[in-house]
Image (tube, helix red, strand yellow):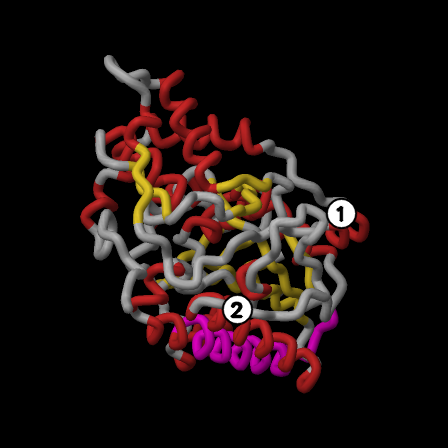
Amino acid sequence: MKILITGGAGFIGSAVVRLAVGRGHSVVNVDALTYAACLENTRSVEHSPLYAFEHADIRDRTVLDQIFAAHAPDAVLHLAAESHVDRSIDAPTDFIDTNMTGTFNMLEAARAHWTATGKADSFRFHHVSTDEVFGSLPADPSTKFTEETAYDPRSPYAASKAASDHLVRAWHETYGLPIVLTNCSNNYGPYHFPEKLIPVVILNALAGRDIPVYGSGNNIRDWLFVEDHADALLTVLMNGRTGRSYNIGGDSELRNIDLVRMICEILDDKRPKSEATYATQIAHVEDRPGHDARYAIDATRIRTELGWRPSVSIQEGLKSTVQWYLDNEDWWRPLLNRNGVGTRLGVSK
């Protein structure tokens, strides 16, 4: 199968690119190479005859039409998006332009290609979204997001992704475009851009700086190892039912403060300090505006219909992630100079 993957130089997208090529699929990586993208993420497959890279912005419909015509993909995995909540609070325009208008352009380019090639039943447009579109859950562990949970986005990022989800469903209902849609929990793992919580904790700890924890640290997230997520995305693309959505979770709910302490303990073991422990660097800082209290995914549908479940526990995943950052300073060190990295964002009043 030839798969057009948008955002394939990003964190999740590159994991999908590496896995898809490894499984023998032909991949066309379409990426604008914005601040969070890095072609080092796909270096392991760049010389494969199964891999092609197109430097393009999904906001440019003309270029997208040219790419579809040149490569004639059998399927689309649409991951390209602005994704950092803090940045969306400070600069929402980028999120509206990319996540909403960019998705509209992708849908129209895919629809034109699908129509021109005879509206094959085998074609798929897989839109990758987030659990943040569902809003916030109460502390009760029996409550989780299902595919039927009403949308209730609380940040500009979440709202832009919710809107893009609605566009995808509308293009299926109105035009018959064969789509599948997934909503995932928080990802972590190798190649995670150093503005998100887990890499920030690791790198600040190693640098001897304060480890920032928003507010009380009691906000709860469900953590999903990125390589498990890549496997789930390909599973849904190949076997998911057209027009259906699937929630993807890691079955690993943790309070942010407990996650940070776990990382500190792993660092204490792998690279101990001469004095004290890394946990002494934890510093509670001003909370994010509108910070959702809890996310938790009910992944029953993908488990029962498609047989997928996460394979990496949070303990295993964090240990391997910390080790990856310890071993790959040449990857993350240059990224620290990129726009906004190392600066507190998302506190605009």
Figure quadrant of residue 97: bottom left
Residue that mark 2 sits on: 153
Outermost residue on the right side: it is: 304
Q: What is the residue that sits farthest to the bottom in this orientation? A: 174
Q: Is residue 168 left or right of residue 149?
A: left
Residue 50's tag is: none
The residue tagged with tag 2: helix, strand or loop? loop
What residue does disc 1 label? 303
Residue for point 65% across, 67% down:
124
Tell me: 74 left or right of 278: right
Magenta region includes residue 113: yes
Alpha-carbon span between mark 1 and mark 2: 26 Å
Residue 205 picture quarter: top left
Give amino acid for label 1.
Arg
Residue at position x 44%, y 32% in the image: 321
In this picture, is 241 found above or below 103?
Answer: above
Q: Percent from the top left, x then y, of residue 43?
A: 37, 42
Residue 256 visible within the image: yes
Q: Residues within 10 Å of mark 2 (few under 14, many from 20)?
A: many
- Magenta residues span 98-121
Q: Position of residue 1 (x, y in %)?
A: 63, 56
Which circle's residue, 1 or 2, is located before the other in the chain?
2
The image shows residue 348, relative to residue 36, as above or below, that is below
Q: Amino acid at mark 2?
A: Pro
Q: Quadrant of residue 336?
A: top left
Closer to the camera in the image, 2 or 289:
289
Q: Quadrant of the C terminus?
A: bottom left
- Please say whether residue 42 is visible from this viewpoint: no
Task: Please check the rendered image and state whether residue 197 is part of the magenta-colored stretch, yes or no.
Answer: no
What secondary structure do most residues of the magenta stretch adopt?
helix
Q: Nearer the viewer, residue 40 or 148?
A: 148
